Image: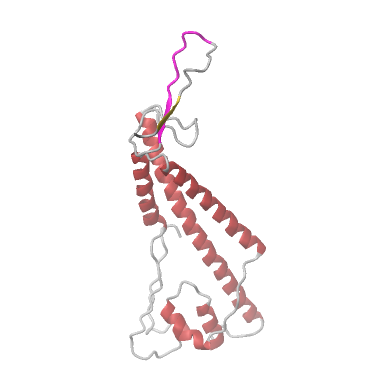
Amino acid sequence: MAHRSTLSHNSLPSPLHGAPPLKRLTFQMLWNWHTIDACFLARSWHVRSMGGFALSCIAAMLLVVCLEALRRLDREYDEYIVRMFRAQSRLDRANRGKEPEEAESCASSVVLDGGLNGELHGMLTRSAVVRRFRASLAQQFVKAVLHAVTFGVAYIVMLLAMYFNGYIIISIIVGAGLGKFICDWTAKTVVFDDEPAREGPICGHSSKVEGIEESGVCA
């Protein structure tokens, strides 16, 4: 037997006699297809019409899209602070009078670029200068805030799914697919290492090393 609960205001005393009874809030802890009088998360989220239920489904879908966007933003911020560190390192070397084209500087910039292909990284690690990067207090605080917001949105999505409403769950799945499509468009640097011997240094952008790098939709 399905466990079904209802919350009704009919038993509460009313200051006005003859007032129309309030509609009851319906929720069920097993799979259901409730529309009218469905209630989600709070008493204020009470569906009173089909239009309201359609808006609820759209809201659930957009919430998951926002979740995927927050996950992408977290990754983009990680890459951003690494790029800032690499740019600062290049500026420091330039201030010390080092040429940006020399091999050590070249190899160091490749190792610190997290977006490069792993095979290219392996070819250059023997001559690379590795520098340890540690986020500053402000950068780590921003990362923590992004993580907390992402965690909160994900928890709300989980609570919505726990109402076991088929329409809401379908909306969540559609939102996950839509969010992945929009906010996580694959863009990688592709290195072709099966070509003949290269004529110039790798960091000199020789024509023998080809790369493809495109920005994603949310980038």
Provide residue 176's location: percent of width, then percent of height: 38, 51
Image: 120 above or below 5: below
Image: 17 above or below 96: above
- Classify the position of the N terminus by image quarter: top left
Which is more toward the observer, 39 or 212? 39
Residue 201 among those drawn in magenta = no
Residue 27 among those drawn in magenta = yes
Residue ID at (42%, 56%): 183
Provide residue 101's location: percent of width, then percent of height: 53, 85
Image: 79 above or below 35: below
User: Farthest top residue?
Assistant: 17
Q: Do we see residue 204 in this rendering?
A: no
Which is more toward the observer, 182 or 144? 144
Residue ID at (62%, 67%): 135
Magenta-drawn stretch, dominant element (helix, strand or loop):
loop
Residue 209's quadrant in the figure? Answer: bottom left
Stretch of the chain drawn in magenta: 16-28
Q: Do we see residue 93 in this rendering?
A: yes
Left or right: 170 as drawn, with respect to 73: left
Residue ID at (46%, 60%): 219
Residue 144's quadrant in the figure? Answer: bottom right
Provide residue 207's location: percent of width, then percent of height: 38, 83
Residue ID at (59%, 54%): 145
Left or right: 117 as drawn, with respect to 101: left
